[in-house]
């Protein structure tokens, strides 16, 4: 029996899914090890081997591929604990990284402070070189100018260097020259250049993205090298793939060339899995909401395609690489409850994480968290958390909430826990609004897919606030991102800037740019990653705008339309997309259009695993009742004794009436007073407002 394994390392838990060639699925969660994430990685594989009832050595030998999502780059940016970074740029542009676009993010905030540059001013250096906007050399670059800079870099013990010269996207000769010289003279120091990271127009976006890649580069490279050595140490012979921010996967060597592609590595897998599930259930559009231990991630899928953006910001740092459009807020099981200066209860964004964790974990945590509130409200079983492997101390949670919050608020412990529950639900609902309503979409028209170990406890209240009548808790909900990693294709994104009006488009140049990117993609997929040519597809994306506009529209086009210059089809698609995004188009006026960038996404299709065989014999739903427990009912504001079902039993094709709790080893599903649930043929839970089950919902499609 052969296995493919997906591993997603989060702030609190490391999620693992192992899918065999016969469809056997093993789902597991283990505590993350923040001091060294690779320790939790290997521990998780060892624990899954025990669950598979085979020796560790035999299980490792049976793994064909491990697909891994890592938060190493994300955490480095969020905590600003990356490498000590220097920037080398063109004379006169030393402060472009700090000036950004000259626009204050909060125009009416007099206390506003700019984000701290990743390369401080004393480590930003310039050289007297210049290439003009057409790519012609105006001032030749002399390598001797780098000698005093190299001396200073060594004196300051710099760990990483970013190179970004003006107009290098048109002509990268000077950057290539500097990169070669610096790598020769700065052994052991990570050096990268913008032509490797983002060879596109707009200097600030390019320099910021390059600085981010340099800032996280040494840490990501060290982590991947450490992980690779540990896998070699356990005699792993299969393939290791890393999840990218764009929802695709690549080999570690590709990541080390441009580490910024992993800044949203973990969360990117959720919409990938969401696209798979929504298509299987007959939906084209879905919203995925993933609540873990530290954060809440919301993403959107349109026409079974994950929505991407090149205007990403992580901790206010601009990253212009293609990444899935994901909203991340500090709302998770470990989110800490606190009282602000006005005496009001708040939740997060600070988190207790895995260590020390919530108070009830008994790992040294003293500040009450969302998980502590959930246990008081009865949504979690203290003796069955993680299947009983981690015992929770309810008494300590009550004591902490009383001392830190309830006493100061003049409320009972139950009232305070209920308040914590309401506030964090409201925070998450706002995150869903941001990814949907603020993008011009009505969330009520989307399939709402709930993921994460904590998500299904809070989802009915989130949906109630957003007037969403139904949500889906997949059978692999608790490790949804890990499952999504096994569904990701190999993807490479390329870009060439070509600023011209379509009236003056040079068709030969346009075609040359596309073919250059196509050849790069084929080399990466065929030669480096061993993908067969018949499994490769090409997806051109054009950045277009009306003449005189400041912002452009990214529009995916058909390869045949682009290569054959079917401009009528391209223009028509642009008008429609512009109208959707901004509420108008200038088609009737005949307004001239401009091209800014030509992008090409090259995709190598991977084999899809079968998560479940669907051959397990179901049991009667009544036999799955484990106990009756007091839980908090939001509609009444009171505790009520309700049935607790064993969600790990095969209660397929059954209907469960709320209120109740469905308890699995890896998660719990709370079904509130006015909601009911149907379990499909593969163990997924379709939870809906009573009497509002959608007609024609395909709840029993076979997974494939």
Image (cartoon, rainbow, N blue to C red):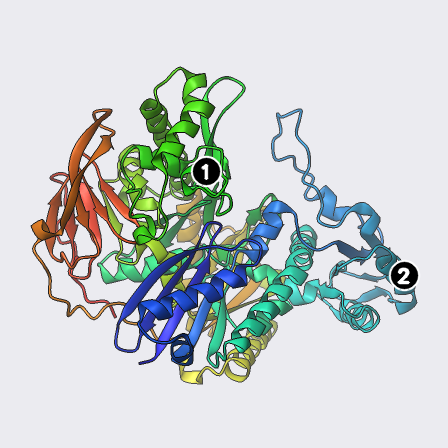
x then y, percent, for residue 84: 74, 54
Residue drawn at x 92%, y 60% is 148
State the quadrant of the C terminus: bottom left
Could you tell me how many numbered marks the image carries?
2
| Side of 332 where 162 appears, left or right | right
- From this viewpoint, is residue 145 visible? yes
State the quadrant of the N terminus: bottom left
x then y, percent, for residue 304: 33, 60
Q: Residues within 10 Å of mark 1 (few under 14, many from 20)?
A: many
Residue drawn at x 40%, y 28% is 399
| Side of 471 where 642 appears, left or right | left
Q: Which residue is mark 2?
A: 151
Q: Mark 1 or mark 2, which has the lower sequence index?
A: 2
| Side of 287 where 249 appears, left or right | right
Q: Residues within 10 Å of mark 2 (few under 14, many from 20)?
A: few
Quarter-wise, where is residue 430 in the image? top left
**309, above or below 558, in the image:** above
x then y, percent, for residue 510: 58, 71
Helix, strand or loop at mark 2: helix
Q: Which residue is mark 1?
A: 335
């Amino acid at each position: 029996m052969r296995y493919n394994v997906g591993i997603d390392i989060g702030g609190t838990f490391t999620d693992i899914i192992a899918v065999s060639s016969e469809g056997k699925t093993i789902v597991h969660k283990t505590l993350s090890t923040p001091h060294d994430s690779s320790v939790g990685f290997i521990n998780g594989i060892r624990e899954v081997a025990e669950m598979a009832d085979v020796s560790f050595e035999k299980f490792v030998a049976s793994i064909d591929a491990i697909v891994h999502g890592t938060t190493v780059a994300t955490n480095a940016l969020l905590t600003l604990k990356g490498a000590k970074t220097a920037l080398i740029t063109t004379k006169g542009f030393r402060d472009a990284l700090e000036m950004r676009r000259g626009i204050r993010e909060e125009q009416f905030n007099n206390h506003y402070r700019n984000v701290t540059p990743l390369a401080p001013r004393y480590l930003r250096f310039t050289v007297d070189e210049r290439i003009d906007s057409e790519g012609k050399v105006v001032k030749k670059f002399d390598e001797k100018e780098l000698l005093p800079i190299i001396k200073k870099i060594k004196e300051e013990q710099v760990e990483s260097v970013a190179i970004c010269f003006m107009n290098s996207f048109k002509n990268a000769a000077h950057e290539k020259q500097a990169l070669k010289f610096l790598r020769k003279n700065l052994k052991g120091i990570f050096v990268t250049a913008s032509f490797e990271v983002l060879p596109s127009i707009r200097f600030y976006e390019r320099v910021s993205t390059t600085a981010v890649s340099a800032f996280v580069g040494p840490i990501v490279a060290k982590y991947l090298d450490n992980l690779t050595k540990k896998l070699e140490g356990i005699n792993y012979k299969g393939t290791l793939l890393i999840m990218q921010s764009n929802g695709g996967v690549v080999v570690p060597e590709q990541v080390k060339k441009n580490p910024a592609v992993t800044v949203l590595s973990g969360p990117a897998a959720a919409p990938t899995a969401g696209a798979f599930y929504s298509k299987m259930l007959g939906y084209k559009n879905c919203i995925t909401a993933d609540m873990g231990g530290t954060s809440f991630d919301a993403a959107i899928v349109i026409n079974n395609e994950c929505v991407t953006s090149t205007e990403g910001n992580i901790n206010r740092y601009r990253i212009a690489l293609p990444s899935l459009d994901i909203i991340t807020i500090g709302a998770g099981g470990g989110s800490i409850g606190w009282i602000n200066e006005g005496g009001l209860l708040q939740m997060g964004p600070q988190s207790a994480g895995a260590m020390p964790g919530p108070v009830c974990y008994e790992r040294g945590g003293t500040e009450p968290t969302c998980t502590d509130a959930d246990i008081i409200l009865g949504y979690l079983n203290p003796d069955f958390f993680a299947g009983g492997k981690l015992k929770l101390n309810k008494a300590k949670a009550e004591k902490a909430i009383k001392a830190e919050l309830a006493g100061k608020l003049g409320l009972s412990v139950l009232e305070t826990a209920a308040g914590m529950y309401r506030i964090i639900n409201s925070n998450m609902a706002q995150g869903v609004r941001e990814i949907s309503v603020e993008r011009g979409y009505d969330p009520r028209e989307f399939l709402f897919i709930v993921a994460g170990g904590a998500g299904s406890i809070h989802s009915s209240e989130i949906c109630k606030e957003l007037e969403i009548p139904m949500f889906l808790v997949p059978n692999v909900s608790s490790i949804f991102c890990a499952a999504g990693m096994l569904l990701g294709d190999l993807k490479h994104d390329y870009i060439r800037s070509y600023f011209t009006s379509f009236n003056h488009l040079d068709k030969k140049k346009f075609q040359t740019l596309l073919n250059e990117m196509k050849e790069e993609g084929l080399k990466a997929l065929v030669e480096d990653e061993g993908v067969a040519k018949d499994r490769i597809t090409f997806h051109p994306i054009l950045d277009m705008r009306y003449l005189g506009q400041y912002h452009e529209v990214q529009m995916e086009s058909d390869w045949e339309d682009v290569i054959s210059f079917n401009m009528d089809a391209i223009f028509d698609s642009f008008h429609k997309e512009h109208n959707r995004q901004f509420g108008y188009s200038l088609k009737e006026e005949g307004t001239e259009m401009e091209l800014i960038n030509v992008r090409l996404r090259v995709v190598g299709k991977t084999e899809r695993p079968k998560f479940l065989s669907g051959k397990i014999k179901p049991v009667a739903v009544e036999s799955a009742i484990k106990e009756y427990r007091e839980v908090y009912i939001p509609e009444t504001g009171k505790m009520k004794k309700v049935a607790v079902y064993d969600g790990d039993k095969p209660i397929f094709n059954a209907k469960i009436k709320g209120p109740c709790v469905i308890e699995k080893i890896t998660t719990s599903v709370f079904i509130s007073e006015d909601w009911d649930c149907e379990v499909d043929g593969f163990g997924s839970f379709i939870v809906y407002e009573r009497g509002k089950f959608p007609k024609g919902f395909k709840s029993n499609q076979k997974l494939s």
